[in-house]
Image (spheres, rainbow, N blue to C red):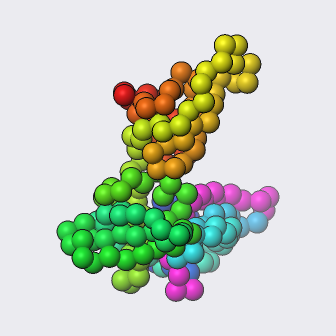
Amino acid sequence: MALLEYNEVTEKKYIVMDGTPYEVISAHVFRKQQRKPVNATKLKNLMTGKVMEYSFHVSEKVEEAEIDERQVKYLYTNRGEWWFCEAEDSAKRFKMTEELVGPQGRFLKPNTVLGQFTFRDQPMGFRYPVTAELRVTEAPPNMKGDTATGGSKVVTLETGATINVPLFVNEGEIIRINTETGDYQARVGK
């Protein structure tokens, strides 16, 4: 159990506050005039997914969380329940809520292997692939002179997710998406 000083709480670190693990989303150490420095952070609760702001003062120390990771396979979604199994043993199935899966789950195809974080043997969030290559299942046709709207259109992907893409993307094509931002990156092929 390592204790972190107020200025060691930086982005991408995991900490424990009140027995709950948090991921540090952003951290900024600053000093207001003649006062002592503080570290203003945004923390994501890894159990509920909620984000909060917290300021660490010079005298504060916080415990660094020991987060483990295991490989799991996404199976399917049914009525808001996301079903997974262990990567090596498909008989060991479990479900997660939509809140714990998060918005990146909309880019998961069945049988995708990803990392699941655990804290004291309790399942938490996931480590998603940064990019995903998905087929466009529905795309509106291009209209001549349509670039006045910014040159993009909304398409539906094979997972059911909808995103904005450039006008030249057509139905049936495979595109690469950044799963963290939900943005179109490139057209990969047909």
Residue 135 image-quadrant placement: top left
Residue 154 located left or right of residue 33 = left
Residue at x-position 68% and y-position 57%: 30
User: Picture coordinates of residue 143 (x, y %)?
Assistant: 66, 18
Residue 38 located left or right of residue 105 = right
Residue at x-position 42% and y-position 54%: 108
What stretch of residues is rendered in magenta? Answer: 18-34
Residue at x-position 32% and y-position 76%: 93
Return the residue nearer the eye: 56 or 143: 143
| Residue sitting at the far right | 33
State whether residue 139 appears in this view.
yes
Q: Confirm whether the magenta stretch covers residue 27.
A: yes
| Residue sitting at the far left | 88
Return the residue nearer the eye: 136 or 27: 136
Residue 104 located left or right of residue 50 = left
User: Picture coordinates of residue 38 (x, y %)?
Assistant: 67, 66
Return the residue nearer the eye: 142 or 70: 142
User: Picture coordinates of residue 154 (x, y %)?
Assistant: 62, 36
* Residue 26, placed above or below residue 120: above
User: Picture coordinates of residue 185 (x, y %)?
Assistant: 48, 33
Q: Confirm whether the magenta stretch covers residue 90.
A: no
Residue at x-position 43% and y-position 32%: 172
